């Protein structure tokens, strides 16, 4: 991360033109511009929620080499506990379609598929049309967790921080795979590692 917070003295009533307050002020200004463009009060509440949760609260992240497993996702800014980190984006498909795709991906030699269960019937497939969230690695002692939220009657998976996350720290969550006979080895190497993902 190239951002460094500079400590400076200012009058308590003077506007903060540096650091996090400047960024928050810019985000609020952008929200006001977008909301005035939306116009209608009928759509304002849901669109405001959508903008707040999925656009303005996401964090600056980078894709890079991981000590856990090949590639991973890393924080480019400090992230406080209980903050939205990123939405897990992909195609919403039913379980039957996800099963067929998983077999097809294996036949095509695609080593990893990025299928994330939303509920009993819905899976998000980020294998071919996802975002950086698909590169978040599993860890038995993760710094994030996944949460399903509903926006405009559509379920979305959002990754939130469990604890403060430092700059250049890898973003991780517990995949919580179902228990199966064939075990998938865990590579997180933490003191509390369970040894397998399932």
Image (tube, rainbow, N blue to C red):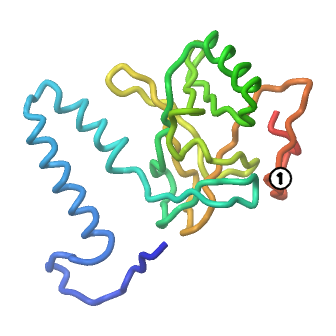
Residue at 82%, 50% (x, y): give it. Answer: 187
Q: How many marks?
A: 1
From the image, tell me which residue sits under label 1. 192
Q: Is residue 95 above or below residue 183?
A: above
Quarter-wise, where is residue 39 in the image? top left
Where disc 1 sits, the SS reads loop
Q: Residue furthest right?
A: 181
Which percent across, then down, holds residue 194?
86, 44
- In the figure, is residue 47 to the left or right of 102? left
Give the answer, above or below, for where 95 lies relative to 167: above
State the residue in front, 180 or 61. Answer: 61
Q: Position of residue 47 (x, y in %)?
A: 24, 33
- Residue 46 occupies quadrant: top left
Q: Tell me residue 196's x, y (percent).
A: 86, 40
Q: Residue at x 50, y 31 (%)?
A: 90
Q: Please give left or right for residue 88 compared with residue 18 in the image.
A: right
User: On the rendered image, what quadrant is the C terminus found in?
Assistant: top right
The residue that appears at 72% across and 27% down in the rendered structure is 108
- Along the line of sight, the residue nearer the viewer: 11 or 179: 179
Q: Residues within 10 Å of mark 1 (few under 14, many from 20)?
A: few
On screen, 77 above or below 197? below
Residue at the front extreme of this rendering? 108
Query: Farthest residue in the bottom direction?
Result: 9
Position in image of residue 109 (x %, y %): 75, 31
Q: Is residue 73 left or right of residue 187?
A: left
Q: Residue at x 57, y 27 (%)?
A: 125
């Amino acid at each position: 991360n190239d951002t460094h917070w500079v400590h400076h003295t200012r009058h308590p009533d003077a506007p903060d033109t540096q650091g996090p307050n400047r960024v928050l002020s810019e985000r609020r200004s952008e929200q006001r511009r977008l909301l005035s463009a939306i116009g209608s009060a009928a759509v304002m509440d849901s669109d405001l929620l959508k903008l707040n949760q999925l656009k303005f609260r996401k964090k600056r992240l980078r894709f890079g080499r991981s000590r856990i497993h090949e590639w991973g996702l890393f924080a480019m800014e400090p992230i406080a506990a209980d903050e939205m980190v990123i939405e897990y984006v992909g195609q919403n498909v039913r379980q039957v379609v996800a099963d067929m795709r998983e077999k097809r991906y294996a036949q095509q030699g695609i080593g990893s598929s990025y299928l994330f269960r939303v509920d009993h019937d819905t899976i998000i497939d980020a294998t071919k049309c996802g975002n950086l969230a698909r590169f978040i690695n599993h860890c038995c002692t993760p710094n994030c967790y996944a949460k399903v939220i509903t926006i405009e009657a559509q379920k979305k998976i959002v990754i939130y921080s469990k604890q403060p996350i430092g700059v250049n720290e890898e973003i991780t969550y517990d995949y919580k795979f179902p228990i199966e006979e064939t075990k998938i080895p865990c590579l997180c190497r933490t003191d509390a590692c369970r040894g397998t993902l399932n």
